[in-house]
Image (spheres, helix red, strand yellow):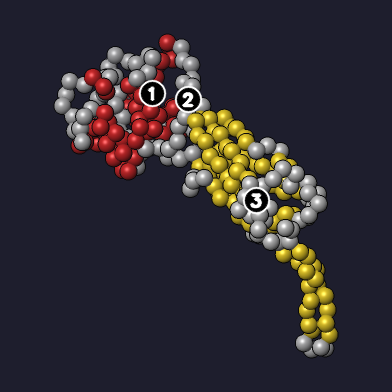
Amino acid sequence: MLGVILPGIGLLAATNTVVTTSPVYVPTLANASGLLPDGVLAWDGESKERNVDANARAADFVFSFTNVSSNPVVILSVHPSCGCTTAKLPPLPWTLAPGTNGQIEATVNLFNATGTLYKGLTVYTDQGFKTLQLKITILPFVMPRMSEAERMQNVKIAVADRQAVFKGDCVTCHVQRGEGKYGQALYEADCAICHEGDHRATMVPDLHALKTPTNFEFWRIWIAHGKPGSLMPAFSTIDGGPLSDMQITSLASYLGEQSGVH
């Protein structure tokens, strides 16, 4: 059962004159709870994929569609599959006349995300609902290539100023990668780059094979304040580093869990 078009009627109180306004389409909702049948809305794609860089803050999608039926279609609501996904569209209810086009924009927040993500948008209309699929692949970080001479020069700079890794060209690897990340994701961005790197310097310890007993406070102090006279920088913003207290706490907790400290 389709909706009906009702004429608009108004009354001008001052002159007692009856006037007509634009007709209003009033949908029926008898079919709204079922799947949207074919031949109503034609989509440019019902599933879309995006590859984004490791430092990406969000992934954006646009779904374009056309009302290919002979009747108006009313979009009642759009429900994302989770809170990290938002949809942008005109005010609802949104009525599309036959033959007209529309777009639904979707943004997925990639805060602290890694790997491959699967999200969804369910579009509810007066003729039924359709679920659109989104796939986001967060590409692994690719370390810039350095010659051995460049590597040794960077070590000399770090020996002279352990905070140098947060300045100049080093920002890309040692600051930007950890922005907005916590716990394991932060470890992989800010710690593994040095402590598990293919060309790990001999004075940089393997954090998984420390002979010193550790606990949460041990990790928190080392991360926040580093060690003067070594290559270990101070990550706390108070000491000129890039990490907030909350990020440092999450990182210390993660490292404590990895070493069996609870």
Q: Residue at x 72, y 64 (%)?
A: 26
Q: Secondary structure at mark 1?
A: helix
Q: Is residue 70 left or right of residue 41?
A: right
Q: Is residue 89 visible?
A: no
Q: Nearer the viewer, mark 3 or mark 2?
A: 3
Q: Residue at x 44, y 27 (%)?
A: 173
Mark 3 lies on residue:
128
Q: Quadrant of residue 177?
A: top left
Does the CB distance between marks 3 and 1 fall below 8 Å? no
| Label 1 to label 2: alpha-carbon separation | 10 Å
x and y, in percent, of residue 63 in the image: 67, 42
Rendered position, 178 above or below 6: above
Q: Is residue 251 left or right of residue 79?
A: left
- The mark found on residue 141 in the picture is 2
Q: Quadrant of residue 256?
A: top left
Disc 3 packing (10 Å; few <14; some 14–19; many ≥20): many
Q: Nearer the viewer, mark 3 or mark 1?
A: 3
Foreground pick, 169 / 40: 40
x and y, in percent, of residue 244 in the image: 34, 42
* Quadrant where the image shows the C terminus: top left
Q: Is residue 170 visible?
A: yes
Does the CB distance between marks 1 and 2 fall below 8 Å? yes
Q: Earlier in the sequence, mark 3 or mark 1?
A: 3
Mark 1 lies on residue:
193
